[in-house]
């Protein structure tokens, strides 16, 4: 048995330690935002955050996630209360088919946590491992920039409120 902390909650996981994290998230925990794409860590549809890093959950054994914080798209917000990045994707209508978007959003979230004001070049480099054929790439870039601005505004407001 493995204990996983996913989106701030601990879960007892029954899967074998070598089971891909993606299978545990979807099949045992019912978290379906991360998608099965290629199964080889090449398309990015399965991306989640492990600690502060974006990882391909289809090739990450669950044993590597034990004792670390796992964040899925469900952990960023909900349909009723979307997080800043989710709201930015909605506002920019950055999803077309939407299959790869959860993975891209998780990689973008990892970037924004590491670099709150990324350049366009940094955003492009971060999202490069993701395959998307929908053609909303410019909207995705605008959404990540919008989210960065919203997060910085929120952070400045919170710092001002504390003083």
Image (tube, rainbow, N blue to C red):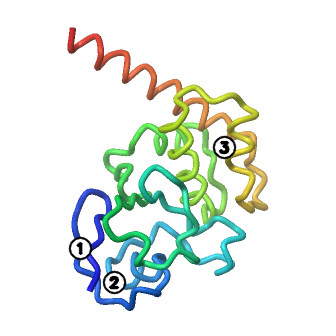
Tell me the crowding category of disc 3: few under 14, some 14 to 19, or many 20 or more residues within 10 angstroms, Cα based: many
Judging depth in this view, the residue of 76 and 1 nearest the camera is 1
Q: CA distance from mark 3 to mark 1?
A: 33 Å
- Closer to the camera: disc 2 or disc 3? 2
Nearest-to-viewer mark from 1 and 2: 1
Residue that appears at 64% across and 76% down: 37
Q: Secondary structure at mark 2?
A: helix
**Side of 34 where 123 appears, left or right:** right
Q: In what quadrant of the picture does the N terminus appear?
A: bottom left
SS at circle 3: helix
Judge by depth and name the residue closer to the eye, 148 or 134.
Answer: 148
For label 1, the SS is: strand
Q: Which residue is mark 2?
A: 28
Residue 11 is tagged as 1
Q: Is residue 53 above or below residue 123?
A: below
Tell me the CA gap for discs 2 and 3.
31 Å
Mark 2 surroundings: few (<14), some (14-19) or many (≥20) residues within 10 A: some
Instruction: Say which residue appears at 55% left-offset and 62% top-offset.
Output: 55
Q: CA distance from mark 1 to mark 2?
A: 10 Å
The mark nearer the N terminus, 2 or 3, is 2
On the image, the x and y values in percent for residue 92 come to 60, 38
Q: Are marks 1 and 2 in contact (CB under 8 Å)?
A: yes
Residue 90 position, x and y percent, is: 52, 44
Could you say which is closer to the camera, residue 124 or residue 33? 124
Give the residue at mark 3.
140
């Amino acid at each position: 048995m493995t204990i996983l902390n996913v989106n701030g909650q601990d879960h007892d996981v029954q899967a074998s330690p070598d089971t891909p994290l993606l299978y545990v998230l979807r099949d045992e925990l019912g978290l379906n935002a991360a998608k099965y794409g290629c199964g080889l860590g090449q398309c990015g549809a399965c991306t989640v955050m492990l600690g502060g890093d974006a990882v391909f959950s289809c090739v990450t054994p669950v044993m590597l996630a034990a004792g670390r914080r796992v964040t899925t798209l469900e952990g960023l917000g909900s349909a009723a209360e979307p997080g800043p990045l989710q709201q930015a994707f909605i506002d920019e209508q950055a999803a077309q088919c939407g299959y790869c978007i959860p993975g891209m959003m998780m990689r973008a979230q990892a970037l924004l946590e590491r670099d709150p004001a990324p350049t366009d070049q940094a955003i492009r480099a971060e999202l490069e491992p993701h395959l998307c054929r929908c053609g909303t790439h410019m909207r995705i870039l605008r959404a990540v920039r919008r989210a960065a601005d919203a997060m910085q505004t929120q952070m400045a407001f919170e710092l001002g409120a504390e003083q």
